Image (spheres, grey):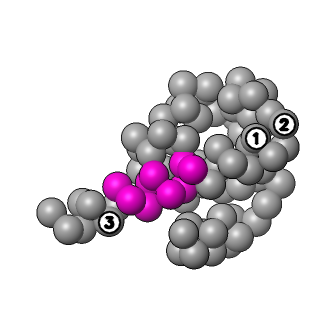
Amino acid sequence: MVKAFKRKKICINFGEIVRAKRHKLGLSQEAFAEHADLHRTYISDIELGKVDVGISVAQKVAKALKTPLSKLIKDIESK
């Protein structure tokens, strides 16, 4: 149960960071989804912490945010 809670918290933190960085870039979810080559509803699910993304999706997200994946991970760990 504790592991599931920690996993969910990481997903929520990742989503909050993605949303904040996307807003900072002035991108809508639709425009961001195009840059990341992902569906807009999937971006929404990521930002809401509903999905546990894999490393390849996280890399696409980082690239679309114009930030290194390692920086996103550090931001999650700092939150």
**Helix, strand or loop under label 1:** helix
State left or right for residue 27 relative to residue 20.
right
Magenta portion: prevailing SS class: helix
Residue 42, given in percent of the width and then of the height, sits at 53, 32
Placement of the C terminus among the 4 image quadrants = bottom right
- The residue that label 1 is drawn on is 23
Dot 3 amino acid type: Lys
State the separation of the CA atoms marked 1 and 2: 5 Å
Q: Which of 79 and 68 is in front in this view?
A: 79
Write down the region rendered in magenta.
8-16
Dot 2 amino acid type: Gly
State the separation of the CA atoms marked 3 and 2: 30 Å
Q: Is residue 56 visible?
A: no
The image quadrant that residue 23 belongs to is top right
State left or right for residue 8 relative to residue 53.
left
* Crowd tier of the residue under label 1, counting other residues whose Cα lies within 10 Å: few below 14, some 14–19, many 20 or above: few
**Helix, strand or loop under label 2:** loop
* Residue at (44% x, 45% y) in the render: 49
State left or right for residue 5 relative to residue 45.
left
* Residue at (75% x, 28% y) in the render: 28
State the separation of the CA atoms marked 3 and 1: 26 Å
* Crowd tier of the residue under label 3, counting other residues whose Cα lies within 10 Å: few below 14, some 14–19, many 20 or above: few
Q: Check if mark 1's residue and mark 2's residue have beta carbons within 8 Å.
A: yes
Q: Residue 26 has which mark?
A: 2
**Helix, strand or loop under label 3:** helix
Q: Give the number of marks.
A: 3
Q: Which of 78 and 43 is in front in this view?
A: 78
* Crowd tier of the residue under label 2, counting other residues whose Cα lies within 10 Å: few below 14, some 14–19, many 20 or above: few
- The residue that label 3 is drawn on is 6
* Residue at (40% x, 40% y) in the render: 50
Residue 2, given in percent of the width and then of the height, sits at 20, 68
Dot 1 amino acid type: His
